[in-house]
Image (cartoon, helix red, strand yellow):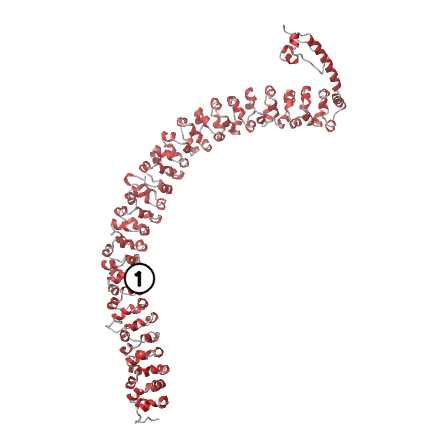
Amino acid sequence: MSLSANLTTAQFAAGGTRLIVSLTTADLAALSTDHLVALTTAQARALSPKQLLALSAAGVAALEDADVAALSGYALTVASQASDFMAALTASQVGALLTTQVQVLKPQGLAALRPEVLAAMRPEGVKTLREAQLRALGADQVRALTTDQIAALAVLQLRYLPTARVDGHDMFRSDQIAAFSTAQIGALGTALLSQFSASELAAIETQDIAALSARQLGVLNVQQVLALRTDQLAALRSLQIGALGDATMQAFDAGRLLALSTAALGGLGSRQVNQLSADAFAALGTAQLAALGVAAIKGLDLRLLALLDGERIAALTPRQINALSSSSLSALSSDQFVALSTTQLAALSASQLGGLSSANLAALQPQSLSALPATILGALTSAQFAALGGAAHDISYLSVAQISQLRTAALSGMSAGQAVALTTAQAARLSAAQVGALSTNVIAALEAQDFAALSGGAISGLTAGQFAVLRSDQILGLSTAQASGLGSHHIGALGTALLAQMQPEEIAALRPAAMAGLRTDQMAALSSDQLRALTAAQAASLSSTQFRALGDAAIARLETADVAALNSSVIATLSTDAVAALGTAQVAALTARQISAMSAGAFDALRDEQFAALGSQQLAGLSSRQYQALSTRDMVALNAAQFGGLSTQVIASLSTAQAVMLTTEQMVALSAAQVAALSKTSVAVLETEDLAAMETADLRALSSAQLNVLSTTQISAFSTTQANVFTTAQTAGLGSAQLAALTAAKTATATAASALSMRVQDLAQALSAYQADVAAPGLDGLRGSAVSHVELNLYAPETPPPLATPRR
């Protein structure tokens, strides 16, 4: 429709939304500002995008704020695409926009807003701006934002702010930067920060500077960093400092470097530190040096390390000292090295060993040696160890724990002066391997009390060459524990005169294996006390060659326990003279195994008293060969216990001559097993009195073959009791004559009793002829005088013996 020119503003407002909907774009363009002012909010809400766009700039500006706030989102979405429409909006109109309306504004339309108009947008509206809307803003628009709008920006929005700026102008005003919260500063994009001017950087508050990430600080160029105030530099954290580039560090003067906090200095890397000028680095105080990280110290240039005096060296922490490379340690001057504290020295590691020059080690005060860690001492070279203690060679301050850590390679470099400086406690800690690594000069230089402190285990480590240089006072001063550490090569190196001077307890302490080193001349030189001091284990270790070197007198002095311990191989080689030198107690101490090892000649050389000292258990080991070598005298000399101890093998080997020589006591001593072992030839020659003396248990042990070789005379010698013990199995092989003799022996009891009665009568008649004083005491009294004994043969009364003539 065509709008009437006479339509009043009241009528226009009264026309409502129907009127608005009926208006053409031409009608809208022709409306006066008064009519537009008269628009109701409902009519404003009914405006279409085309109708909005049809309004002139004056018409847009004439819209009341409430009407603008009533515009539909759709109408604004379309209209905001037009820069003219957006550029015509006034500050109050933009300030009246709802957040929902702000959200639908097109980026290009938002970019058309005049800076002062955008500055009127409510902060809550700014807070809803999307990425595309923010990226569309111009530098002048951003610079026009109020501090409230700046403060309203979300952290996520900040990264979308434009980075392009107008030449000669800062992106932000100082008050804007001050309005940024710490979180917002931390969220600023690196591209934006990299363009900050000195004034912009200076406007950042110190707490906000500390909020910058290492990545943000890393994009700042040299001039930007140098523009930071000292209080801003002091606020930087260690992680931020680590992001500064080489050029920046090169530009740092002493003032700026000292402005950094000690905590921030800990973030510097070795590459950064090495970029510092000599003046800047030299300006660092002890507290600041101690704050440097181990990474910075580890790669520190030698040019900077050389700038540190003793005080600054001493200020480094143990961890920093531990981080120094071996080349850095090696570069330290003697003055710098001696400035290290015991705590710092204790922090050194084995990997730094190459940096410990002999000159520096020699410069260490002896008191500082105790601080060297065990790992360092355990890796020292011979040259490095030789330098310890300086000119005085005083290594007495090394702890026993440190001594135990020393390698043989290091100890091989010990000097004679260091050996003299050793304490007894240190010497006592040395191991066998460590002692074996010492030079002969060092061994010879050891003081007597230090040598005496060496353990037996350490003594065992002495080489033959080392042992050869020992002084007589060192050897004669050996304790029993040390003597126990001597080996055969040590003993073999001793002269006979020196060996003869060793105390018996030292000899007794020698290990059996060491005894193998004794030469024959040394054996011959052993004193009586030394021989008596030998232990059974030592005696058992002696060889036959060594034992043969002992004289007869020396053999006689051996204790019985030592004799009993002698190896069978030694016993087997005993000469007849050596056997003769043995005392009866020594012979009695010999074991059955030793007896069996004796040669036949040596066994036969035993004297009567020696032979008598042998027990049944010893003779149990006697071999047939040894027994056959016995003389008839020795055989007869065997008592019942000795004979009963002979093995069945020996009994079985008896010859007929030896069987004939058996005594009645020996026969009675035979066990059933021995009787069963008798050969038939031996049984056949047994005398009748020997058979008559045999026990019934032994007779039961006779086999039918053994019984079969007995003559009738031998069988007749059996008593009735003996004859009746034989079983049918035993007598099955007997001949008729033997059976007759056995039967007669079984029935000989009555005859023997009659004969005994007649002999008793004869005895009574004979006794009556003696004086009363002789006969009065009875038989017991007669037994006390030889002349009163009457030999009676009760079994053969036919020939009574004459009575002895009584003494007057």
Viewer can see residue 155: yes
- Give the residue type that dot 1 points to: Gln
The foreground one among 256 and 549 is 256
Above or below residue 799? Residue 466 is below
| Residue 742 shown left or right of residue 353 in the figure | right
Above or below residue 85? Residue 530 is above
Q: How many marks?
A: 1
- Residue furthest to the top in view is 808
Quadrant location, the C terminus: top right
Quadrant location, the N terminus: bottom left
Mark 1 packing: few (<14 Cα in 10 Å), some, or many (20+)? many
Dividing the picture into quadrants, the one containing residue 105 is bottom left
Q: Position of residue 265 (x, y in %)?
A: 29, 57
Q: Position of residue 63 (x, y in %)?
A: 30, 84
Q: Position of residue 25 (x, y in %)?
A: 33, 89
Q: Which residue is mark 1?
A: 240
Secondary structure type for disc 1: helix
| Residue 169 shown left or right of residue 592 in the figure | left
